[in-house]
Amino acid sequence: MHGVPISWYLALSVVLFGLGVAGFVYRKSVITVFMSIELMLNAVNLSFIAFSYQLQRIDGHIYTFFVMVVAAAEAAVGLAIILTIFKNRGTLQIDEVDSLKN
Amino acid sequence: MDTFLFILFATISVVCAFNLVLQTHPISSALSLIGVMGSLAVLYLLLGAEFIAMAQMIVYGGAVMVLFIFVIMLLNAGAEKSGGKSWFAQILGLPLLSAFVAVLAFIIRMVLPATSPVQFGSWVGGTAADVGKAIFTTYLLPFEIISVLILIALLGAVVLAKKEIE
């Protein structure tokens, strides 16, 4: 039985993080931008778990657990903000929310 | 078998992540994100993180994604309008992103020593018992603080969703 080296997991993490950044920068819908942030958090979690396996220590798992909790809290607050934006402006396009510009 | 499982689920997660970025309708992106999270849970299991794999499925695949899909349905979010991108993002976006990914891959290649391959079951320190022991001994204070954080987030979400801004 041959496995893959740990660097493959880190490479996958880098690719997913890059895709998350691309979604964050390129997409216009607030909800999709928010999902890209979740994708980036997941990519970082994968590298935490990979390092935890490599060092044979549990600490990486705990950090991942905390990231998950913070991400859940962030999702709840962020979606409430999106709800408020939609109620007040009637749009989900990120470039139409530009009160600070003028 | 380990190699096969890694390549299968890594491919699924990368394809789903591409789909997330490329789809214009938010509900398609949300379903792709569920695919990414499910395949990442399998990869966590391969790395010996049993508890985190289950938490990933329940917290991310369950709770967070239900919240996302609920909001998409509630707001009746349609496909986003295209266009209006700045010239900076259009010209320099992809090269900068590729450079970023290449630099990170190079750093991984340079810094990481040659390691033995990942074998499923060669490290079993990630069970619920081990994680619980670490949380309630070494990481007790952060754990208590994060419970307060989640309470504040709960209250904040309720207040934000109720408030009417004039």
Image (cartoon, coloured by chain):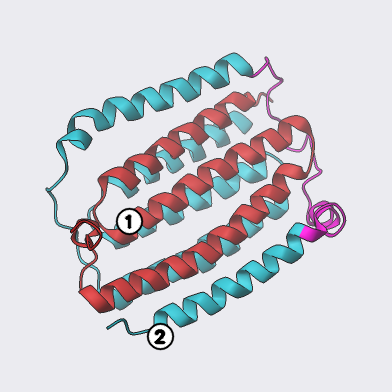
In the picture provided, is B98 more to the left or to the right than A51? left
Q: Which residues are magenta?
A: B112-141
| Crowd rating for badge 2 (residues with CA inside 10 Å; few <14, some 14–19, many 20+) | few
Q: Tell me the red chain.
A: A
| Crowd rating for badge 1 (residues with CA inside 10 Å; few <14, some 14–19, many 20+) | many
Report which quarter residue B125 is drawn in: top right
State the image coordinates of residue B80 (x, y, percent, origin top left). 19, 58
Residue B66 can be seen in this image: no
C-alpha separation, residue under disc 1 versus residue under disc 2: 23 Å
State the image coordinates of residue A91 (x, y, percent, origin top left). 21, 69
| Viewer-closest of B159 and B135 | B159
Residue A53 can be seen in this image: yes
Asked if marks 1 and 2 touch (Cβ < 8 Å), the reply is no
Residue bearing the label numbered 1: A32
Q: Is residue B14 above or below residue B28?
A: above
Residue bearing the label numbered 2: B162
